[in-house]
Image: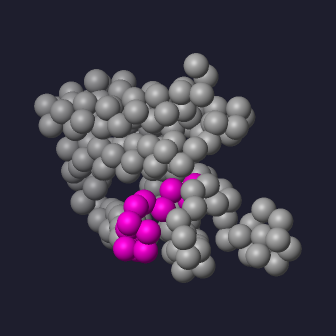
Amino acid sequence: MLRHVPNALSLARILAAPALVVCAAGGHETAFTWILVPALLSDIADGLIARAFKLQSPIGAILDSTADLLLLLASFYGAWAFYPEVVAEHIPVGVLLIGAWGVQMVAALWRYGRLSSFHTLLSKIAGYLLGFFVGYWFVFGFQPWLLYLAVGVSVLGNLEELVLLALLPAWRPDVRGLWWLLRERRTGVA
């Protein structure tokens, strides 16, 4: 029974994304926030549960990456729908974030025919920071420094994943990061 919990949480996030879009399109910011915050928290929970109980799987990695992508897009849409002036003020930062992420996603699709799903330590930290930023924004208000921190770490994470794409000839989920991959290649120990 427990083995299905991480995937169920990812599926719940996938289902939350269209609900978020509907709430944003209808101007229901309170409902949007009440769906968004638990969805963001479930992203942390599914990973913690999967790692703590050794429930990681290739399908789980793909579900998690898909849920992250859909939740990110729904969050962007909500930010644009509810705070267009803030989004307009920070277009270069948004373009940097989406551009770095988009290049990495397209490169992964081109190289492996699927999302990378590396789940590196840096990308996890970036995801947590982005989730914290978005959740904080909708609950307490916009904080530019938190946006810049989250975007900076996210861009670094996407750059690391681009290097991993170049180094890994075959798809492999849940790569801890570049340092670990290089150590593994040098010592033969994962």
**Residue 171 horizontal/vertical position (percent):** 53, 65
Between 144 and 38, which is closer to the camera in this rendering? 38
Q: Residue at x 51, y 42 (%)?
A: 60
**Residue 75 horizontal/vertical position (percent):** 33, 44
Q: Residue at x 60, y 79 (%)?
A: 167
| The C terminus sits in image quarter | bottom right
* Outermost top residue: 1
Q: Residue at x 35, y 37 (%)?
A: 14
Magenta residue check for 164: no
Q: Is residue 121 left or right of residue 110?
A: right
Above or below, 2 against 185 in this view is: above
Between 131 and 70, which is closer to the camera in this rendering? 70
When asked about the image quadrant of residue 126, the answer is bottom right
Above or below, 69 against 88 in this view is: above
Q: Is residue 78 visible?
A: yes
> Total marks drawn?
0
| The N terminus sits in image quarter | top right
Q: Is residue 97 visible?
A: no
Between 52 and 100, which is closer to the camera in this rendering? 52
Above or below, 156 against 62 in this view is: below
Above or below, 29 against 119 in this view is: above
Q: Which residues are magenta?
A: 107-119
**Residue 50 horizontal/vertical position (percent):** 63, 36
Q: Is residue 68 left or right of residue 189?
A: left
* Outermost left residue: 26
When asked about the image quadrant of residue 185, the answer is bottom right
Q: Residue at x 25, y 30 (%)?
A: 19
* Outermost front residue: 170
Report the colour scheme: one colour
**Residue 34 horizontal/vertical position (percent):** 36, 24
